[in-house]
Amino acid sequence: MNTTRLLCCLGYILLAPFIGGLLDGIDRKLSARMQGRTGPSILQPFYDIIKLFHKQIFLVNHSQFFLVGSYLVFVIFSGALMFAGYDLLMSFFALTTAAMFLVLASCSTHSPFSAMASQRELLQMMSYEPMVLLACVGFYLATGSFQVSDIIQSNLSPIVFLPGFFIGFVYILTIKMRKSPFDISTAHHAHQEMVRGVTTEMVGSLYAITQIAEWYENVMLLGIVALFFINGNPISWPLAILGVLFVYFLETLIDNTTARLKWSKVLSSAWLVTLLFGGLNLLVLDLMIKYR
Amino acid sequence: MEILIPLLIVFPFVAAAVLSLLRHAKAREIVMYAASVIVMLLAGSLLVLWLQNGAVSVSFYVETELVDGAMLVVELFLMVLVTVLCARRHRYLIALLSIAQTCLLAWLDLWGPAVKENAHIRVDGLSLLLCLIVAVIGGLICLYAVGYMRGYHHHHKDVQDRRSFFFAMLFVFLGAMFGLVLSESLMWMDFFWEVTSICSFLLIGYTRTEEAVHNSFRALWMNLLGGLGFAVGIAYSSAVLHTVSLSEVVSLGAAIPVALLAFAALTKSAQMPFSSWLLGAMVAPTPTSALLHSATMVKAGVYMLLRLSPALCGSLTGQMVALIGGFTFFAASLLAISQSDGKKVLAYSTVSNLGLITACAGVGMHETVWAGIFLLIFHAASKSMLFQDVGAVENALGSRDIEDMQALMLRLPKLASIMVIGIAGMFLAPFGMLISKWAALKAFVDADNVVLVLLLAFGSASTMFYWTKWLGRILSISRVRLAHDVTKPNEWVSLYIHAVLMVLLCATFPLLSTWVVEPMLTGMFGESVQVLTSDNMVLMIVMLCFIFLLPACVYLFTRNLRHTYVISYMGGANAGDNNHFIDALGEKKNLQISNWYMTGYFGEKKLLLPCTILSTAVLTVMMCMILVGGVLV
């Protein structure tokens, strides 16, 4: 048991950036095709990262190192927790801490663009947090445990009990992955009014670190998506991978077909979806358990 | 112990009497120091004695006629005092509240129905924990107050210097708190309850400005209303249940007295719709805010609820308490977003956290009470630290607005570091509050309380928002005017001890759980459950290590890295110092960066009234249901 935990954990730490980078490359390629362009090679993100590491380091202040470093470490830590099969809630708490370090890194620079974006990033966090917590609660109700190692052993795929949670989670995933229409704090596309948002003041290897952290984070989030499908039966694993790929494609599609919203709409729509889908599903699930 | 307990309760009153008579500043300060230390020592020795006696619940003093009589006299005196003060400001209704409850209690005491003999004092884990919080944190605040008030009157020449009175009140308050948490008899508890209400009223009105007087009367009527509920609850339980012992009322679980006591507790711990008194109390000097309105007095309310929790579990009263608490947690955390006054954010956060403790107590299950007690411990330590810190920052900067705390880490590094510890302790993984939140969430799910789960999920999202933006402001680095740190040594002593205490609490919380909180719960619920799994404990400790080791590692790694400092990006218009930009006419303009407050969405004007109406409606309807139901049954 402990060796599997260790292996999964190590597997995540070593492989996640490659999977995340590859997915990023696929995303770029897909987006380009959707827009009628040829697009770069799917290995382009890796070339970019390598180049970034060879650049000179420009800092606005020294605390950026620590804050961005903490962001990376906490993202890896929370993902490792999840992949090692530990408490889901705990790993999300760690992820929140990680996200907060990114906001602090952005705040610390006292630049108008990153200052504005850090408030927006906080707003985004506030928008998706309730659904994240509820998703954990959903898994707990569906499988009787917060432990990922128990969740993947359940008889039925959790999604059977959690369709509303799934919709809600995919909705906030769009915010988490910084996809349009919710890319208000920073976007993957050339950003006009916010320059580069929270990462405006991060250049060279500092920026590369945030990029790698984002890959780790994406793999972790997609891991949660997979968790909706996985059950004790090994056949569910390929299904889960298909599910993940479908969700990822959906995010790319949404990204390319929608226009950016105002921040107030991001907050209100995310909370509404959370309450409607997550809340209702929670209520139904609770009643089901009570009268089973 | 029979001697130590009365000593612990009476000593602060004696100290107060001495302080109120002393006019010489130096002498007064020495008495303050000595008394604070003695109070801490007394509470400490009570703990040691209790541990030596096997750490079990013990009760004392069955025969107390003389003391009862003395209390009655004091109570009547307080009634007259309140009536006179109210009459002077033409607030007759408030006086009526005081008269009604005092007369009721006096009647009960003298001619009321016969009740079973019972002990008047009980010492157990929970009451001792509260004693320690009051003694250590209260004592430190008193140390802090000495230095702070000197600075306060230096800055506020318009306020009449009534420091003797102020310090005396602090100690009266400490004594009353000891009495309150050690009382087993509801009559005694109510007496101390009323003393704390009046103390807080007098302290809020310290500056005697129009606003202070107005707010102090609001605090008074809300607390007296709760006190009236308390008195009626006692009257009912002595008439019907023939007992005035708290533990018996809890074990009998009768709906009406429990509901009335819970109502009193809700007013005292400033739950919606009564939270406005705590917000208003922020006009008082900082030690008052720290002592009464964050660390100790509001804890009296949740202490009562935690005591009642076995009776609340599964009952309609419990549902009411949990609902009000959960709603308060959510609403206050939204309201906190719109505040830029540091003390007001702290006040809203206090209300919000108390709401969470209240919700935990209302659900009344083993795990929730565990979470509630943990929240109580961490909240007391970190909030009192934050209040004192904001007070010290205010003395240095002349403002306590969060927007003025830009780059505080450079300007007042020591105060800012303490603030960071406090804020991180309030909401971040892996610090104490978060682990309690984790336990609370799990327990709310187990209790099938969907509404509470939703309120907790949304409320913690907004909690994160207002804390992080404050943190961002402090850590934001820009070239600013340096500030002169005017914090006095005695303030430092208190702040440092708080900071160390906070870090220790965070580092040792698994031990705290096994050795302190678990046995306490075993006493209350009769069984022991492991709330925190060992896996999670290890994870939290690993995270804690990260937090402390990371800065050092990053420093080592990046020490020799070649890097160039640049100015921040302003679309090419940075004037060169990060603080100014060149506008379209070629002039240098000052760059102002501010946080979001979103007053159009979360402002007091927008939210306060609907929240108050909603919670009043819920409280009224549910109270009526419980009372009518109780009478019919």
Image: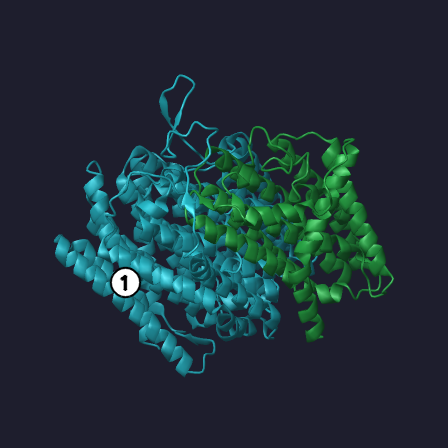
In x, y percent, where is residue A148? 71, 63
Q: Nearer the viewer, residue A18 or A273?
A: A18
Q: Is residue A226 left or right of residue B96?
A: right
Q: Which amino acid does label 1 sit on?
A: Pro
Q: Is B418 placed above or below A128 here?
A: below
Task: Name the residue: 39% across, 35% down.
Answer: B578
Q: Is B538 placed above or below A216 here?
A: below
Residue pointed to by mark 1: B12
Task: Name the residue: 58% across, 37% down.
Answer: A185
**Quadrant in the picture for residue B7:** bottom left
- Can residue A84 be seen here? no
In x, y percent, where is residue B238? 50, 62
Q: Is B401 placed above or below B100 here?
A: above
In x, y percent, where is residue A218? 67, 50
* Quadrant that contains the N terminus of chain A: bottom right
Q: Nearer the viewer, residue B560 or A100?
A: B560
Instruction: Assign a secondary structure to mark 1.
Output: helix
Q: In this view, does B630 lie to the left or right of B249?
A: right
Q: Residue furthest top?
A: B585
Q: Which chain is green?
A: A
Q: Which chain is cyan?
A: B
